[in-house]
Image (cartoon, helix red, strand yellow):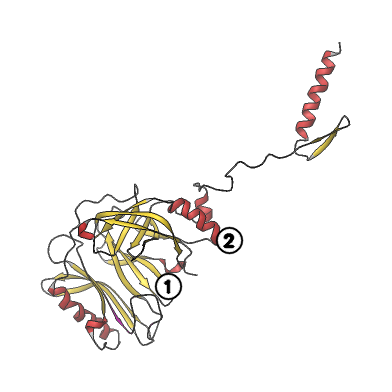
């Protein structure tokens, strides 16, 4: 008749031990029982990003647009922003997140080692970029990467590319066949710039040839005369750094019409006597949102840093700036 009582006592002991398992130690029948938490598993300090991390750490949740720049030693890849419909979502470290934590998670999620990126130039796929190491962070605290460009022979002389991570790149049709800077483009570029300079009450430069810092021929619609993109500067350089306080910048996209020649369809004029330096330069164009037409990626140079903007056509076929990442700068 003692067996049921023994089983009852053992069951009670198990229940008591279970209830007290959160304690460090306890006394039981004159013996001290100590509970020690098991050590964390090996590698527990390395955290892999999860979808839940994205909103908390400001990590991108979709496709990221990149800018790749050739360099003498190692080529560089810079995350520009997250493609979001017709616009771009700015990448930035949220307030309250440490730079170290953001950089670690961002590199794991966006720039893992040996990742390949598909390169685009003038609307066509032209090669790959392979990530080999870590680059410095941008002024927004966004990590960059270092690696190597491998491009087709026709794009061997090109220094800048738009890029997407392999598997997330837009599907484009066509071969790389960049339009040439023709005689009419060279003739009209300073004439159009002079008109914009005088309309905005700015002084003429000492030499239009020296003021022209970038001139590109772009072909948004195949056939006919290509469009042009150009940057003219006075008292400034197309790099990060302080300008002459009396300087200015003129950037525009112009299309050709038989009757009027080249006419700006989009322009930016910055008078440094009235506002801080902004010197825009076209990086490239690509239909990255798949909605038809081209999106233009522009790099903006300021006194202390650089950032990006995107120009696209609205529903009325008018060119306008749809995003600028300047707001992320601290």
Element under disc 2: loop
Residue at the spot 77% in from the left edge and 27% down from the top edge: 14
- Mark 2 and mark 1 lie on one chain; the one further toward the N terminus is 2
- Of all residues shown, which one is farthest toward the front? 73
Magenta stretch secondary structure, dominant = loop
Point out residue 294 in the picture as x, y percentages from the top left corner: 26, 60
Point out residue 238 in the picture as x, y percentages from the top left corner: 33, 76
Element under disc 1: loop
Image quadrant assignment for residue 150: bottom left
The residue indicated by pointer 2 is 96
Can residue 288 be found in the magenta stretch? no
Residue at the spot 23% in from the left edge and 55% down from the top edge: 152
Out of 160 and 325, give the one closest to the viewer. 160
Count all numbered tags in the image, as a single digit.
Answer: 2
Bounds of the magenta segment:
231-243
Q: Is residue 81 above or below residue 189?
A: above
Residue 287 at least partly seen = no
Out of 266 and 71, give the one closest to the viewer. 71
């Amino acid at each position: 008749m003692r067996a049921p009582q023994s089983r009852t006592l053992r069951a009670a002991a198990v229940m008591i031990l279970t209830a007290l398992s959160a304690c460090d130690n306890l006394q039981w029948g004159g013996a001290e029982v100590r509970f020690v938490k098991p050590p964390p598993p090996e590698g527990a300090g390395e955290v892999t990003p999860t979808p839940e991390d994205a909103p908390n750490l400001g990590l991108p949740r979709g496709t990221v647009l990149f800018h790749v720049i050739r360099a003498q030693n190692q080529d560089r890849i810079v995350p520009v922003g997250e493609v979001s419909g017709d616009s771009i979502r700015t990448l930035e470290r949220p307030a309250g997140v440490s730079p170290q934590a953001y950089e670690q998670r961002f590199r794991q999620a966006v720039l893992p080692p040996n990742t390949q990126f598909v390169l685009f130039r003038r609307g066509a796929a032209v090669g790959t970029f392979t990530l080999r190491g870590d680059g410095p962070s941008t002024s927004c605290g966004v990590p960059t990467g270092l690696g190597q460009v491998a491009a087709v022979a026709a794009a061997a002389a090109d220094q800048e590319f738009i890029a997407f991570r392999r598997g997330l790149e837009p599907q484009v049709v066509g071969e790389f066949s960049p339009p040439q800077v023709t005689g009419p483009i060279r003739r009209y570029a300073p004439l159009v710039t002079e008109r914009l300079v005088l309309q905005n009450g700015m002084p003429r430069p000492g030499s239009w040839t020296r003021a022209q810092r970038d001139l590109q021929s772009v072909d948004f619609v195949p056939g006919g005369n290509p469009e042009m993109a150009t940057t003219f500067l006075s008292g400034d350089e197309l790099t990060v750094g302080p300008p002459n306080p009396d300087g200015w910048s003129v950037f525009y996209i112009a299309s050709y019409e038989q009757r009027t020649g080249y006419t700006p369809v989009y322009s930016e004029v910055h008078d440094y006597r009235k506002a801080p330096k902004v010197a825009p330069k076209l990086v490239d164009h690509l239909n990255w949102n798949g909605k038809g037409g081209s999106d233009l990626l522009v790099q903006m140079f300021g006194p202390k840093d650089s950032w990006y903007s995107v120009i696209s056509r609205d529903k009325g076929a008018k060119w306008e700036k749809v995003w600028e990442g300047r707001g992320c700068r601290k």
